[in-house]
Image (tube, rainbow, N blue to C red):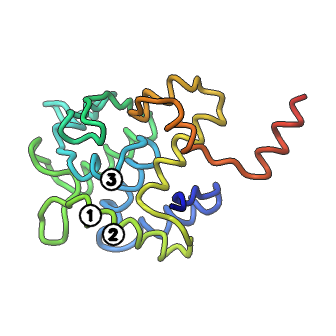
């Protein structure tokens, strides 16, 4: 099975620009950013409620706690939200939803219903089609997240924990390597 495409920096910028347009731009952008900057799986994104991201005062949390019922491995985990992702959540929380009820789904369809993982997968696939990026899928953001951490020199064990994997070999399969990265690697010698 072919792995999801990991966009280059230029492709990622184009993808964000395309996704941010239109009536549902803020919602679509947040879905994308949760995948790229949180490393979340599409099912985890679809299951999010505003109370997962915001505290009782409406402030964006620094950590997201995923329950075992929404994770692929059936094990609860903590997702750390970096400053860029917290800013995206804050912007969407104030522009897309006036005062979100904490139990309300973060991402809703045009019919104001929560996305299923399957419908969100199809929506995200459409993002890549619109941006002209063949091979992109709802898993591209997660692969981008893991690849970026690996190439930044983050500990493999830390990446494994952030990804919610049980085995380092699983995490290693997510890391994308291209010719430019290999050129940089050999120049270190």
- Label 2 SS: helix
Residue placed at 32% from the left, 45% from the top?
89
> Which residue is the site of mark 1?
118
Q: Secondary structure at mark 3?
A: helix
Element at label 1: helix
Instruction: Identify the residue at horizontal 80%, vertical 44% (top origin).
Output: 182
Between 176 and 11, the one nearer to me in the picture: 176
- Marks 1 & 2, CB-CB < 8 Å contact: yes
For label 3, the crowd category at 10 Å Cα-Cα, with few meaning under 14, some 14 to 19 and many 20 or more, is many
Residue assigned mark 2: 122
Separation of residues labelled 3 and 2 (CA atoms): 10 Å
Residue nearest the viewer, comparing 138 with 36: 138
**Residue where numbered disc 3 is placed:** 42
Residue 180 vertical placement versus 164 (above, below): below
C-alpha distance separating marks 1 and 3: 8 Å
Instruction: Pick whichever of labels 3 and 2 is earlier in the sequence.
Output: 3
Quadrant hosting residue 13: bottom right
| Residue at 17%, 38% in the rendered image | 69
* Image location of residue 36, percent across then percent down: 46, 48
Left or right: 89, with 136 as reference point: left
């Amino acid at each position: 099975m072919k792995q999801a495409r990991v966009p280059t920096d230029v492709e990622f910028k184009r993808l964000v620009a395309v996704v941010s347009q239109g009536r549902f731009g803020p919602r679509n952008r947040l879905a994308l950013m949760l995948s790229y900057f949180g490393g979340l799986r599409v099912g985890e994104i679809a299951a999010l409620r505003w109370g997962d991201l915001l505290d009782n005062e409406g402030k964006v949390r620094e950590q997201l706690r995923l329950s075992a019922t929404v994770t692929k491995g059936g094990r609860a985990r903590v997702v750390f939200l970096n400053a860029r992702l917290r800013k995206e959540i804050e912007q969407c929380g104030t522009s897309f939803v006036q005062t979100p009820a904490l139990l309300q789904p973060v991402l809703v369809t045009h019919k104001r219903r929560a996305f299923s993982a399957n419908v969100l997968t199809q929506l995200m696939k459409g993002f890549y089609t619109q941006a002209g990026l063949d091979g992109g899928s709802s898993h591209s953001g997660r692969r981008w997240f893991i690849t970026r951490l690996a190439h930044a020199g983050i500990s493999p064990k830390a990446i494994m924990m952030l990804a919610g994997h049980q085995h380092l070999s699983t995490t290693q399969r997510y890391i994308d390597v291209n010719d430019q990265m290999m050129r940089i690697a050999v120049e270190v010698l």
